[in-house]
Amino acid sequence: MSVTNSMILASTLRDLNGSLNRLQRSQTELSTGRLINRPSDDPTKATQAMSLRTQDRVGTHRQRAAEDASGWLDTAGSTLMSGLDLMIRVKELTVQASNSGASTAQSRGAIASEMRSLRDELLAMANTTYIDRPVFNG
C-alpha cells in the first residue's frame, strides 16, 4: 500500500481540525470560566450541575423559610411578653380597685381610665402584623 499525497493532506487536515476544535473549546472554557457550556459538552456533568443548582435553590428557599419563621416567632413572642406585662398591670389595678376602703371616686376613675388604656394597648397587640400579615389574626 502506498501513501499518497492526498492521504497525507487529508490526515494533516483532520489533525489540524481536531487541534483547532480543542483550542476553540479551551478558549471558550477560559473566556466563560465554565467547563460545561452546553449539555452536549459533558452530559453527565451537566446533569450533576443541574442537580446541584436545584439543591441550592431548595436550600436557599428553606433558609428563607426558616428566617421567616424565626422572625414570625420573635414577633409573636415579644408581643406576648408585652401582653403578659400589661395583664400583670391589669391584675394590680383590679386588686387595687377591689380594696374599697382605700379607694376614692377619683382613684377609681383614674384606675378605670388606665384600664381603658391598657385594653386599647392589648387590642393593638392583637392586631400585630409581621410582613403585612396578622400574627394573631386580629
Image (cartoon, rainbow, N blue to C red):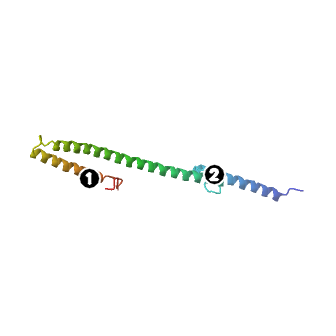
Q: Quadrant of the N terminus?
A: bottom right
Question: Which one is nearer the viewer's eye here, 16 or 49?
Answer: 49
Residue lying at the far bottom of the rendered structure: 6
Q: Quadrant of the C terminus?
A: bottom left
Of 30 and 38, the residue lying toward us: 38
Answer few, some or many: residues within 10 Å of disc 1's Cα (few below 14, many 20 plus, some between 14 and 19). few
Q: Which residue is mark 2?
A: 45
Give the label, 2 or 1, closer to the camera: 1
Q: Is residue 11 above or below residue 88?
A: below
Residue at disc 1, secondary structure: helix
As drawn, the residue found furthest toward the right would be 1
Per the rendering, the mark at residue 123 is 1
Residue found farthest to the left: 105
View extreme (top): residue:
102
Residue 100, horizontal then vertical, whole percent? 13, 43
Q: Residue at x 65, y 53 (%)?
A: 44
Cβ–Cβ below 8 Å for labels 2 and 1?
A: no
- What secondary structure is found at the residue carrying circle 2? helix
**In the rendering, which numbered label is found on residue 22?**
none
Q: Earlier in the sequence, mark 2 or mark 1?
A: 2
Indicate the position of residue 49 as horizontal and vertical percent values: 59, 51
Q: Residues within 10 Å of mark 2 (few under 14, many from 20)?
A: some
**To which quarter of the image does residue 133 belong?**
bottom left
Distance in Å between CA atoms under marks 2 and 1: 58 Å
| x and y percentages locating residue 8 in the rendered image | 81, 55
